[in-house]
Image (tube, rainbow, N blue to C red):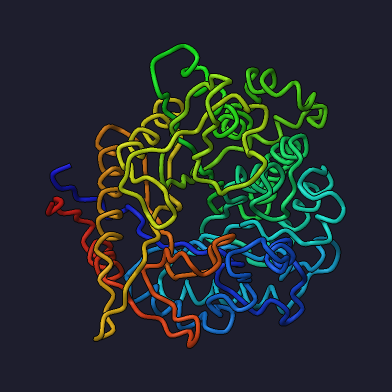
């Protein structure tokens, strides 16, 4: 891409998540989430870090909205903490929690910024996990009640309602590999969680349609770009199997109204999928105004030969258990660099490939990049500036990849950088920094990195200049 001008209608935004930035973990009636429990369990997170304080956004939200406005962004994607607005995940709602998000939404609207609200970004009320979590159908039904309460409270002041963020992570990392909360390693439970998350999406999506018909409806998926190590039939079949688990387990029911047959066959040794009730797939397939796409890196696989040492370089955290249910004979291979601080390969061409796949398979479905960004080891110079050139290069190359996809027909309508702020990066604690704004965790002082200044210029002009190197 030699240069590209995005249309005025293209949305430039930033994204965050409640447990990663809010803090105030025990204030104003907030209940306990699975991430509170998980992060307070010794050995689960780097340095024993927790989200108890995080970026203290709960108390500093006005300042943070000021940064969003100063950046000139058209939209802000945030998530609502279920245990803050409905402690315990059922029954009475907590007015103090609802009031916090109501002030946040009004503050965004006053600044001319579209509120994009994610209902679930992984902070399940602990009481629901104690009753079975996402492996239980009851959790999907409770999610429907939660959605009715929060959509009813915030109404159509929210521009876009996103039901779930990355259900792949919730199901497989939470219930199969255990590297995310709730930390279970139960393959059958993970597949049940896949379905109940899908069902929760469908039920909540229908709540939005009925309660806030003027609002847009979305879901955000972290779709994988999976490539074979060779053109052999075995390696291509490894791609097919991982694609079923990673992508089509969600795209199938959400957009096609059915689970892919090969997924059911591949996993038959783990479960009979009897948790899928008659009519569920129809409920899940609620029409979307926009499909949210999160992308960071690509994946390389091959069929394991049964002799060589297994390779598990899938980028999703080390565990004795695998997130890839019923795929123990697939190798995930290391890829050539460069890498981000997460150890993820940098592959913007795969981003274009993913967007064009979605355009090809779902040609009438508008797309939104709801997360893309990179963690690097930022250095604060003596004068206080943060010259994060590698992040700028990463963002430039990936936004150029979006431009390439748009030029080839993909209906991509916006881009949300991950993340507005440095934050609690799940199992990596505070060691990995994704923000375009630095947070000093000792003082909570916010400092714009050079990437923030770069992104502000891009949002103002829509003009992506050619790369300088």
Q: Is residue 171 above or below residue 34?
A: above
Q: Residue at the location (81% across, 32% down)?
A: 275
Q: In this figure, what is the number of numbered marks?
A: 0
Residue 243 appears in the picture as rendered: no
Q: Residue at the location (77% across, 71% down)?
A: 31
| Left or right relative to 6: residue 176 | right
| Left or right relative to 137: residue 167 | left
Q: Residue at the location (63% across, 64% down)?
A: 80
Q: Is residue 13 above or below residue 430?
A: above
Q: Is residue 110 above or below residue 196?
A: below
Q: Residue at the location (50% across, 85% down)?
A: 442
User: Residue 298, percent across and down?
Assistant: 41, 38
Q: Quadrant of residue 73?
A: bottom left
Q: Quadrant of residue 29?
A: bottom right
| Left or right relative to 277: residue 331 | left
User: Residue 10, percent across and down?
Assistant: 32, 52
Q: Nearer the viewer, residue 167 or 297?
A: 297
Q: Nearer the viewer, residue 198 or 116?
A: 198
Q: Is residue 65 above or below residue 133?
A: below
Residue 153 appears in the picture as rendered: yes
User: Residue 293, percent across and down?
Assistant: 46, 44
User: Residue 225, percent across and down?
Assistant: 43, 34
């Amino acid at each position: 891409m030699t240069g590209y001008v995005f249309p005025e209608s293209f949305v430039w935004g930033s994204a965050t998540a409640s447990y990663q930035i809010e803090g105030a973990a025990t204030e104003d009636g907030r209940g306990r989430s699975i991430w509170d429990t998980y992060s307070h369990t010794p050995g689960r997170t780097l340095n024993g870090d927790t989200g108890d304080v995080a970026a203290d956004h709960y108390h500093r939200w006005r300042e943070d909205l000021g940064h969003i406005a100063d950046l000139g962004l058209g939209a802000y994607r945030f998530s609502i903490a279920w245990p803050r607005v409905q402690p315990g995940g059922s029954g009475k709602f907590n007015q103090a929690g609802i009031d916090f998000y109501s002030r946040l939404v009004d503050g965004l609207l006053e600044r001319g910024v579209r509120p994009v609200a994610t209902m679930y970004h992984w902070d399940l009320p602990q009481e629901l996990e104690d009753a079975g979590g996402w492996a239980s159908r009851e959790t999907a039904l409770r999610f429907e009640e939660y959605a009715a309460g929060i959509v009813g409270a915030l109404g159509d002041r929210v521009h876009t309602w996103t039901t779930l963020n990355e259900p792949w992570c919730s199901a497989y990392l939470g219930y199969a590999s255990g590297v995310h909360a709730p930390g279970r390693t139960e393959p059958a439970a993970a597949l049940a969680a896949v379905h109940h998350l899908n069902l929760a999406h469908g039920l909540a999506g229908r709540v939005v349609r009925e309660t806030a018909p003027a609002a847009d409806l979305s879901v955000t998926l972290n779709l994988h770009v999976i490539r074979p190590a060779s053109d052999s039939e075995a390696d291509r079949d490894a791609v097919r199997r991982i694609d079923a688990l990673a992508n089509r387990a969600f795209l199938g029911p959400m957009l096609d109204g059915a689970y892919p047959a090969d997924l059911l066959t591949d996993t038959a040794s783990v479960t009979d999928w009897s948790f899928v009730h008659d009519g569920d797939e129809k409920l899940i397939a609620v029409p979307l105004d926009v499909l949210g796409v999160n992308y960071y890196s690509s994946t390389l696989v091959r069929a394991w030969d049964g002799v060589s040492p297994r390779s598990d370089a899938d980028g999703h955290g080390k565990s004795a258990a695998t997130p890839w249910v019923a795929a123990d004979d697939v190798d995930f291979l290391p890829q050539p660099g460069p890498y981000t601080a997460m150890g993820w390969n940098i592959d913007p061409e795969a981003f274009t490939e993913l967007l064009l796949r979605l355009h090809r398979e779902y040609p009438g479905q508008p797309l939104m990049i709801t997360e893309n960004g990179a963690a690097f080891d930022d250095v604060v110079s003596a004068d206080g500036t943060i010259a994060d050139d590698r992040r700028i290069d990463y963002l430039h190359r990936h936004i150029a990849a979006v431009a390439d996809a748009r030029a080839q027909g993909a209906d991509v309508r916006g881009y949300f950088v991950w993340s507005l702020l440095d934050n609690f990066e799940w199992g990596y604690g505070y060691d990995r920094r994704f923000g375009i704004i630095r947070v000093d965790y000792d003082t909570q002082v916010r400092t714009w990195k050079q990437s923030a200044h770069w992104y502000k210029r891009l949002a103002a002009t829509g003009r992506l200049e050619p790369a300088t190197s």
